[in-house]
């Protein structure tokens, strides 16, 4: 081995060697998939209430979910979900799909095909009557179509092709009564560009449950999807081979792919990280010197293998007291435990160790260690050891100072954890991810971090966490372990929170929202306006906050400003804003009423799958309002809205089928939709179903049931139920006549804006006698009824207005004083001038009613 007495010549030599070795290492570079958000919906239904239970799905999906989380998916999981639970789970998933790189659905459980469509069957489904598919199941196309609009790649896995154990053989599908698929299993699904549809067996055939804890398909999928650096089509080929073998050829998995790019569940990370050229000094004549070699690693924390390709020509290299031979293979950790015996080696001699570090993905990187024998190396080694201890002490102190709690706002993208930089003295240390949030996505810059991954010191300040929607108030722990196991780990707890704007003004069923939302009159403008103004400033790129600011402005009765804000949100891509803008044209709020314009705008929201727009545009099509009528399409769109849990659509469908509007009357079908709304505690469904039992239209009259449903609807805020209830108490129908109860409920209906409640209360007061108080009460409620009478109230002649004229002026004067007390002098002056006492009463009634902030949204 040559001696190098000049450091410049030594460095030049080593650089040549390193360059040669690195050029070899580049040949091992593997394809790395572009990073991006991955979201998955995983549902497993085993324990059915009336249908045969299935032994495996619940077990399947827990394992599948773990596999997908390890592959970087943010997983929304549902196990043994009923129809409402399935609906909630699907909505949470759909909210997470916006701008996803890949969206995946894995369903295991009962499925059914009707009319060429596939439906997921929740655990409370009975499927006993022809009405049950549309109210008890979830159409797969509804989820898939939304996924196609919001993600670049769609992956669908269906382990749901069991025998159909359903009693009914035909089910209503919109306007048709369709038979259950003639073939067994599920129907074929053709994939669009960028999609892959995988069945656990061939379309129309039946999958087997197997004899183990997992189905044959899920067992193989979990195994093969966990194999690193394997493209998805190869994964499915291997799955097919496994399942055929496990089932003796009885089950043959099938898929239909139109993927445009390669997809890897576990893509190859960058090749192992190795210091390409390290220089270490050892003392002359030392029998054993442990070499301070920096360990290699890769970012996923995979087990690495080191192969020693070249050994020093002089001296002896050993591991654990045993000599090392050229070509020896060892774990990466062993590299840091190599020792060198410099006995008999002259000072100034340089020996080279050349090695290759390989990862499980078939990638490799080369490294070189130059060992220089030196007379003063002992002091240098002692200094290095001292520096190492300083680094460890600094790293330990750093870990102890990390913040313990980090609040992360939901639905604004990745939120910086705000962790401080690692001290310069410890900058060469790495940190292992020992525990990771099981919901949401952790990143270091653009890189998604998984359990066991290795973080460089420079990664720590870049860490960000994107919480999963629906995880508010749930703590999630990140535990970092320094590469030196002697140091105690540090845990950072992420606490997902809702922005104040979401808490104050989110919209119900908003598939780009993050929470359940509030009805319009549940919004408190004094809270919502500043909260949403701040949110728009803090997150100008989040269109949801712009839309919710518009809702707050509407609640503040600033329709003109709200129109501009909502239009801005729509232009920025918020889908619900499309419906909101449409409704402003429909009701003539700040813009001229224009049914055609409203319908045209709503069409765009329906195309994007918004449940409110689906209902609104579907209704316009069905009745031909503002657009050319198309009853078939209108019916289908309203059914889609109902599938997503929109109770307005359920009530409209119930009304259509109960009364035979453009279709033959089918009361039983109508009642199913009303009952579906009642299951969701919808106040309109409660009132509508109560009317069915009150008058015996569509079902036998049941007055106790009607009374109970009316009461629940009224207590929930429904505007017409109090009047219906008041009339039952007034007339003694199904309950003992009780005038006081009748007055209470009729006044409640009047206060909510029900014309008939106000009219009936006025008539009741007028019938009480000729005393001043009774007549004044009658005047007040006749005036209120006149003020709130709207087109479609059922009384175009306005009986209240006519009755008001018949009352004595003295009673009207008393009523006037009662109204005036509620208004300020300025509010009184703002009223239009009139010489008519009747007109004055109507104006006062309207002004005082509006001041009390009635629920406009209820009508």
Image (cartoon, rainbow, N blue to C red):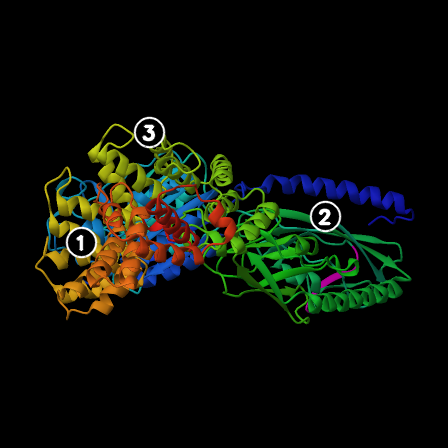
Question: If you read the primary sequence from the N terminus, does the residue marked by circle 2 or circle 3 appear first?
Answer: 2
Q: Is mark 2 on a helix, strand or loop?
A: loop
Please tell me how crowded label 3 is: few (under 14), some (14-19), or many (20+) other residues with Cα within 10 Å: some
In the rendered view, would you say 337 is above or below 11? below
* Tag 3 and tag 1, C-beta contact below 8 Å: no
Please state which of residues 837 and 793 is positioned toward the viewer in this rendering. 837
Q: Residue at x 24, y 55 (%)?
A: 685
Task: Give percent across and percent down for residue 506.
Answer: 46, 51
Residue picked out by circle 3: 596
Mark closest to the chain's N terminus, 2 or 1: 2
Residue 814 appears in the figure: yes
Q: Quadrant of residue 372?
A: bottom right
Tell me where residue 466 appears, x and y as whole percent. 54, 53
Task: Please identify the residue farthest to the left as the structure is shown.
Answer: 700
Judge left or right: residue 695 versus residue 819.
left
Residue appearing at x 18%, y 41% in the figure: 115
Query: Which is in the foreground here, disc 2 or disc 3?
Result: 3
Let me know if residue 318 is in the magenta part. yes
Residue in view at x 67 percent, y 39 percent: 23
Q: Nearer the viewer, mark 2 or mark 1?
A: 1
On whether residue 489 falls in the magenta region, the answer is: no
Looking at marks 3 and 1 on the same chain, the residue that comes earlier in the sequence is marked by 3
On the question of residue 233 being in view, the answer is no
Vertical arrangement, residue 836 with respect to residue 747, above or below = above
Q: Quick check: 813 left or right of 394?
A: left
Q: Where does label 2 land, which residue?
A: 276
Mark 1 lies on residue:
672
What is the spatial separation of the Cα atoms under label 2 and label 1, in whole angstroms? 71 Å
Region in magenta: 314-320
């Amino acid at each position: 081995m040559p001696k190098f007495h000049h450091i410049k010549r030594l460095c030049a030599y080593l650089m040549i060697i390193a360059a040669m070795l690195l050029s070899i290492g580049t040949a091992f570079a593997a394809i790395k998939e572009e990073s991006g958000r991955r979201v998955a919906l995983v549902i497993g239904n085993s324990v059915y209430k009336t249908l045969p239970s299935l032994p495996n799905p619940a077990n399947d999906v827990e394992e599948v979910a773990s596999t997908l989380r390890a592959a970087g998916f943010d997983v929304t999981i549902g196990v043994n979900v009923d129809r409402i639970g399935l609906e909630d789970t699907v909505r949470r998933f759909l909210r997470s799909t916006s701008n996803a790189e890949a969206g995946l659905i894995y369903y295991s459980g009962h499925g059914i095909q009707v009319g060429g469509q596939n439906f997921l069957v929740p655990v409370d489904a009975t499927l006993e009557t022809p009405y049950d598919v549309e109210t008890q199941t979830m159409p797969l196309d509804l989820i898939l179509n939304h996924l196609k609009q919001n993600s670049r790649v769609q992956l669908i896995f269906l382990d749901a092709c069991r025998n159909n154990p359903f009693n009914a053989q035909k089910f209503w599908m919109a306007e048709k009564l369709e038979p259950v698929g003639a073939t067994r299993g599920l129907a074929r699904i053709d994939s669009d560009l960028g999609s892959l549809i995988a069945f656990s067996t061939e379309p129309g055939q039946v999958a087997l449950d197997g004899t183990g804890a997992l189905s044959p398909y899920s067992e193989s999928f979990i195994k093969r999807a966990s194999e690193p650096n394997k493209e998805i089509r190869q994964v499915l080929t291997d799955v097919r081979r496994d399942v055929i073998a496990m089932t003796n050829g009885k089950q043959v998995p099938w898929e239909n792919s139109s993927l445009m790019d390669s997809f890897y569940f576990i893509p190859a990370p960058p090749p192992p990280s190795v210091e390409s050229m390290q220089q270490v000094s050892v003392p002359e004549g030392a029998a054993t010197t442990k070499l301070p070699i920096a360990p290699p690693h890769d970012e996923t924390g995979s087990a690495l293998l080191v192969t020693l390709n070249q050994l020093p020509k002089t001296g002896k290299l050993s591991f654990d007291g045993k000599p090392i031979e050229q070509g020896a293979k060892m774990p990466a950790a062993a590299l840091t435990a190599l020792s060198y015996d410099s006995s008999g080696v002259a000072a100034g001699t340089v020996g080279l160790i050349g090695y290759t570090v390989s990862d499980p993905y078939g990638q490799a990187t080369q490294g070189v260690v130059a060992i220089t024998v030196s007379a003063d190396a002992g002091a240098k080694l002692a200094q290095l050891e001292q520096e190492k201890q300083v680094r460890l002490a600094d790293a330990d102190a750093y870990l102890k100072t990390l913040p313990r709690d980090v609040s992360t706002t939901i639905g604004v993208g990745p939120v910086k954890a705000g962790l401080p930089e690692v001290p310069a003295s410890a900058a060469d240390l790495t940190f292992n991810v020992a525990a990771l949030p099981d919901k949401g996505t952790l990143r270091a810059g653009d890189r998604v971090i998984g359990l066991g991954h290795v973080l460089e010191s420079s990664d720590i300040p870049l860490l960000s966490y994107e919480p999963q929607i629906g995880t508010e108030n749930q703590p999630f722990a990140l535990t970092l372990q320094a590469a030196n196991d002697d140091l105690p780990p540090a845990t950072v707890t992420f606490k997902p929170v809702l922005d104040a704007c979401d808490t104050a003004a989110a919209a119900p069923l908003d598939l780009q929202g993050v929470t359940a939302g509030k009805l319009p009159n549940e919004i408190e403008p004094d809270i919502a306006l500043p909260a949403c103004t701040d949110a728009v400033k803090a997150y100008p790129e989040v269109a949801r906050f712009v839309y919710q600011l518009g809702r707050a402005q509407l609640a503040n009765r600033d329709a003109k400003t709200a129109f501009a804000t909502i239009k801005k949100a729509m232009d920025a891509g918020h889908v619900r804003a499309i419906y909101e803008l449409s409704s402003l044209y429909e009701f003539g709020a700040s813009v001229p009423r224009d049914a055609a314009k409203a319908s045209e705008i709503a069409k765009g929201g329906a195309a994007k799958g918004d449940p409110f727009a689906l209902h609104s545009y579907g209704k316009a099509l069905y009745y031909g309002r503002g657009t050319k009528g198309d009853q078939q399409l209108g019916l289908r769109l309203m059914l889609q809205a109902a599938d997503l849990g929109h109770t307005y659509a359920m009530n409209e469908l119930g009304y259509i089928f109960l009364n035979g509007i453009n279709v033959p009357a089918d009361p039983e079908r109508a009642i199913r939709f009303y009952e579906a709304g009642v299951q969701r505690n919808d106040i309109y469904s409660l009132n509508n179903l109560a009317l069915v039992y009150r008058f015996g239209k569509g079902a036998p009259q049941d007055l106790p049931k009607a009374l109970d449903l009316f009461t629940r609807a009224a207590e929930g805020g429904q505007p017409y139920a109090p009047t219906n209830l008041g009339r039952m108490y007034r007339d003694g129908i199904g309950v003992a006549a009780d005038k006081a109860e009748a007055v209470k409920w009729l006044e409640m209906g009047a206060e909510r804006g029900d014309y008939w409640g106000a009219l009936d209360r006025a008539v009741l007061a007028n019938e009480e006698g000729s005393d001043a108080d009774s007549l004044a009460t009658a005047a007040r409620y006749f005036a209120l009824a006149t003020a709130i009478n709207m087109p479609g109230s059922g009384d175009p002649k306005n009986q209240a207005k006519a009755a008001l004229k018949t009352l004595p002026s003295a009673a009207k004067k008393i009523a006037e004083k009662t109204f005036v007390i509620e208004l300020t002098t300025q509010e009184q002056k703002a009223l239009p001038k009139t010489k008519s006492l009747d007109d004055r009463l109507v104006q006062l009634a309207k002004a005082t009613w509006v001041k009390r902030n009635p629920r406009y949204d209820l009508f």
